[in-house]
């Protein structure tokens, strides 16, 4: 168990809908990262938050947004969903948000999103 | 150019044998970390092993070792004494300080495409 909790594990919804994915980082970790894993794109970095502030953005669509709350949990909001948004969404956490290449990222079990 | 390249889409190994999963990387940053993660069919990403760019010795974690050849920019994962439970997807990843645009990457990981390992009894 990595200590990173993601809910829900599975989500099935229809095109055009909006969903929220939730992530609780490991105790003591201040940084949260969101990744998307799809068959065609592989694992893609979406966005990083550190202690409530956005730190880095990757290939995140404008229809997607995220935030990190004072208790450090994070939510990824996906709106106007399309079939191509079906993927496994991972949250990861680490202690700091500074560019320390030595820090490990610990991943949650992921949320499998299916858009029908 | 791909930052992380895993050239083996699939690998097969006999139980109790050793197997090497290849990973090459591309960076101009002198400071970076290399990671291997395991993703079983259940989907979670499990951290296996880490190698820092300045580490003199190859990293080892139990049955996992990392064959780090800095000049060749390769970081191959060696699994010794394979077990049936080792059957999974394996990802190589890199963490840099500076990204391609010259900005700070803030520690995000860049992943390779993965290698599916199948262990036969």
Image (cartoon, coloured by chain):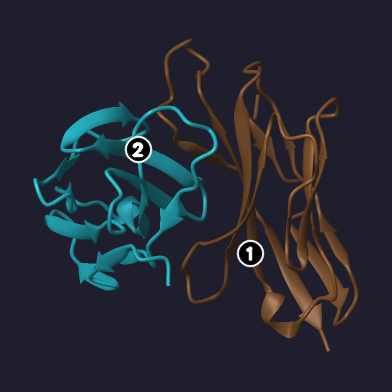
Asked if badges 1 and 2 are on one and the same chain, I answer no
In the figure, residue A107 lies in which quadrant? bottom left
Instruction: Name the residue furthest top.
Output: B102
Whether pointer 1 and pointer 2 mark residues with C-beta atoms closer than 8 Å, the reply is no
The answer to whether any part of residue B83 appears in the image is yes
Q: Which chain is cyan?
A: A
Indicate which disc residue A96 carries. 2
Q: Nearer the viewer, mark 1 or mark 2?
A: 2
Residue at the spot 43% in from the left edge and 13% down from the top edge: B103
User: How far from the left and from the top, in percent, is residue A34?
Assistant: 33, 47
- Which colour is chain B painted? brown
Quadrant of the drawing holding the N terminus of chain A = bottom left
Q: Nearer the viewer, residue A19 or B46?
A: B46
The answer to whether any part of residue A115 appears in the image is no
The chain that hosts pointer 1 is B
The residue that label 1 is drawn on is: B89
The chain that hosts pointer 2 is A
User: How far from the left and from the top, in percent, is residue A111?
Assistant: 31, 65
User: How far from the left and from the top, in percent, is residue A76?
Assistant: 20, 49
Q: Residues within 10 Å of mark 1 (few under 14, many from 20)?
A: many
Q: Secondary structure at mark 2?
A: loop
Q: Nearer the viewer, residue A61 or B19?
A: B19
Q: Residues within 10 Å of mark 2 (few under 14, many from 20)?
A: some
């Amino acid at each position: 168990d990595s200590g990173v909790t993601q809910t829900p594990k599975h989500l099935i919804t229809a095109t055009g809908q909006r969903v929220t994915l939730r992530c609780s980082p490991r105790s003591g970790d201040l940084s949260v990262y969101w990744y998307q894993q799809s068959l065609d794109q592989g694992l893609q970095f979406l966005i990083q938050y550190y202690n409530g502030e956005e730190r880095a953005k990757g290939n995140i669509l404008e229809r997607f947004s995220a935030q990190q709350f004072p208790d450090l949990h994070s939510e990824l909001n996906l709106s106007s969903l399309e079939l191509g948004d079906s993927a496994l969404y991972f949250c990861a956490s680490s202690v700091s948000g500074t560019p320390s290449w030595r820090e490990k990222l610990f991943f949650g079990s992921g949320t499998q999103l299916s858009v029908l | 150019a791909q930052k992380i390249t895993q050239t083996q889409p699939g690998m097969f190994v006999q139980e109790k044998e050793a197997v090497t999963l290849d990973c090459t990387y591309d960076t101009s940053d002198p400071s970076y970390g290399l990671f291997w993660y395991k993703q079983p069919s259940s989907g979670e990403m499990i951290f296996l092993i880490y190698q820092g760019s300045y580490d003199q010795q190859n990293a080892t974690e139990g049955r996992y070792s990392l064959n780090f050849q800095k000049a060749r920019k390769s970081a191959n994962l060696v699994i010794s004494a394979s077990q049936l439970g080792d059957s999974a997807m394996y990802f190589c990843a890199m963490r840099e300080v500076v990204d391609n645009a010259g900005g700070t990457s803030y520690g995000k990981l860049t992943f390779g495409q993965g290698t599916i390992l199948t262990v036969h009894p």
